[in-house]
Image (cartoon, grey):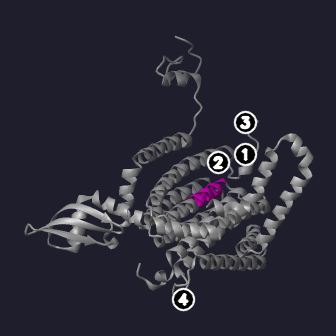
């Protein structure tokens, strides 16, 4: 990944070494150092102009500026088409870089659908003038991301995400919107601060820098090669971790063995070799047997995540519980109504003797 | 995963798509946080950035054949829930003071005269 970052990082590194040299050297060499850095920067910009990913990002950024401002519907329509084209171009380019050529001719349909839904929802969320609709579009983003999780083989997290985010967190947001939303009169429209973005152009420019750096780091040929190599190297270790998880669940181990061979009465031990595993088992008639298991008998995603969570990160799990508890306390303390108490009431609450007697007019009774 | 349409896409293609979506979602969240004035929407945009981080975690977990990426997403969900509870409590508190959700109303950090 370090290799992947060099084209973007080179001018920055130059600047840093230039700043780090002795002040006298800086005074003498400043012009040449500056011009060298500048020319390098120009080179990087020139290569970026030839890079379709960076160009698509720039097109999308321009479209987003027009979408964020309250414009005429024609302008908005044009910007939407432009943004869609930019996203489609980006997706095609990025998928093309991962293709090895031996895939079937069908384009990857589901990643495109979910990616498009997520992006459209996100853009609409940050451009919609009504906060409630923005929250609803965020639910669309959550569901599309859940679909992405499913495609990546993370079934448990996909449904956990939808339940926790769309079901719990977003409902909290909705309630707060209803508590704090100001709707003066019917038909008065949205509040001005929801219609006018603050500094849209600098914000989109920062976002453009961010996304071009990220895509540069993710999709350069070096990063692509790194990911392919890492994927090949870790496939076996991943399967072995799965077998270890299976071994730590005796009941599931027995069930898995019985799925392969219904005669199995008890299991002794699991031996892993490469992606596969061999299970020494005793059959119902008392004889021993070796059962070969291939990776399709690995525990499912939810079980693997559960074993990983409690066996590798028990401290993190505990701390997560403490974080949630503290957030609960914090929210209760923040949101309760603050009542001004007089000196006398505070004395009473603290269990001290009050200055005034109940029922008497305040202050006139004096100190008893 | 035996459906032909999913089968047509290799793992590397799905990972690339997910990474692209993750980068773009994070950027959308960043832009929204910088440019929206409504405090609730600003916090909603941080949730969008959490989503993008979670997606990147799972995509890289897929690359490295490691379920730890998914475990980290559980922690992200925890922090997001805690953050939502606290942030929304703060927003309700701020709304009670100024009767507006505009973050510009708080550009001068001092007690009301």
Q: Earlier in the sequence, mark 3 or mark 2?
A: 2
- Is disc 3 in the same subunit as disc 2? yes
Task: Please state the horizontal and vertical placement of residue A179, each as a whole percent of the image.
Answer: 58, 53
- Is disc 1 in the same subunit as disc 4? no
Residue ID for mark 3: B111
Task: Please state the horizontal and vertical placement of residue A296, each as a whole percent of the image.
Answer: 33, 73
Residue A142, placed above or below residue B33: below
Q: Provide the secondary structure element on which disc 4 rests.
A: loop
Start and end of the magenta stretch? B39-50
CB within 8 Å, label 2 to label 4? no
Residue ID for mark 2: B95
Residue at image point 89% right, 41% down: A24
Residue A361, placed above or below residue B23: above
Q: Chain of mark 4?
A: A
Mark 4 Cα-neighbour bin, 10 Å: few <14, some 14–19, many ≥20: few
Quote the CA–CA distance across marks 1 and 4. 56 Å
User: Quick check: is A65 in the magenta stretch?
Assistant: no
Work out which residue is located at the far bottom of the displayed protein and give it. A105
Residue ID for mark 4: A105
Q: Which quadrant is home to the N terminus of chain A? A: bottom right
Mark 1 Cα-neighbour bin, 10 Å: few <14, some 14–19, many ≥20: few
Quote the CA–CA distance across marks 2 and 1. 11 Å
Quarter residue B112 falls in = top right
- Is disc 2 in the same subunit as disc 4? no
* Front one among A319 and A241: A241
């Amino acid at each position: 990944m370090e290799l992947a970052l060099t084209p973007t990082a080179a001018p920055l590194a130059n600047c840093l070494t230039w700043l780090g040299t002795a002040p006298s050297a800086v005074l003498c060499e400043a012009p040449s150092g500056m011009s060298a850095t500048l020319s390098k920067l120009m080179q990087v910009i020139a290569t970026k102009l030839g890079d379709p990913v960076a160009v698509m990002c720039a097109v999308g950024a321009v479209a987003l500026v027009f979408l964020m401002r309250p414009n005429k519907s024609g302008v908005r329509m044009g910007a939407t088409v432009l943004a869609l084209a930019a996203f489609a171009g980006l997706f095609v380019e990025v998928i093309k870089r991962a293709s090895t050529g031996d895939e079937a001719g069908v384009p990857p349909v589901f990643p495109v659908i979910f990616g498009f839904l997520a992006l459209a929802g996100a853009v609409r969320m940050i451009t919609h003038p009504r906060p409630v609709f923005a929250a609803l579009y965020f639910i669309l983003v959550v569901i599309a991301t859940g679909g992405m999780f499913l495609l990546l083989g993370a079934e448990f997290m996909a449904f956990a995400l939808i339940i926790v985010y769309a079901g719990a967190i977003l409902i909290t947001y909705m309630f707060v919107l209803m508590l704090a939303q100001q709707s003066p009169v019917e038909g008065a429209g949205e509040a001005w601060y929801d219609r006018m973005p603050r500094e849209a152009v600098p914000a989109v420019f920062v976002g453009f820098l961010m996304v071009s750096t990220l895509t540069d780091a993710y999709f350069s040929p070096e990063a692509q090669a790194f990911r392919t190599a890492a994927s090949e190297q870790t496939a076996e270790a991943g399967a072995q971790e799965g077998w270890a998880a299976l071994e730590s669940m005796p009941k599931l181990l027995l069930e898995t063995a019985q799925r392969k061979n219904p005669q199995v009465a008890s299991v002794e031990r699991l031996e892993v070799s490469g992606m596969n595993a061999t299970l020494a088992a005793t059959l119902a008639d008392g004889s021993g047997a070796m059962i070969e298991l291939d990776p399709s008998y690995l525990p499912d995603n939810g079980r693997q995540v559960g074993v990983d969570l409690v066996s590798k990160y028990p401290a993190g799990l505990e701390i997560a519980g403490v974080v949630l508890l503290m957030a609960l306390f914090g929210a209760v303390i923040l949101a309760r109504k603050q009542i001004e108490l007089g000196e006398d009431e505070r004395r009473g609450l603290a269990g001290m003797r009050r200055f005034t007697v109940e029922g008497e007019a305040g202050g006139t009774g004096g100190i008893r | 995963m035996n459906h032909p349409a999913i089968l047509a896409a290799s793992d590397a293609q799905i990972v690339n798509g997910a990474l692209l979506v993750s980068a773009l979602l994070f950027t959308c969240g960043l832009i929204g946080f910088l440019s929206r004035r409504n405090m609730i929407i600003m916090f909603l945009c941080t949730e969008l950035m959490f989503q993008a981080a979670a997606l990147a975690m799972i995509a890289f977990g897929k690359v490295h054949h490691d379920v730890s990426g998914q475990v980290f997403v559980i922690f992200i969900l925890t922090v997001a829930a805690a953050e939502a509870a606290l942030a929304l409590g703060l927003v309700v508190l701020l709304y009670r003071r100024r009767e507006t959700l505009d973050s510009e109303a708080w550009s001068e950090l001092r007690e009301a005269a």
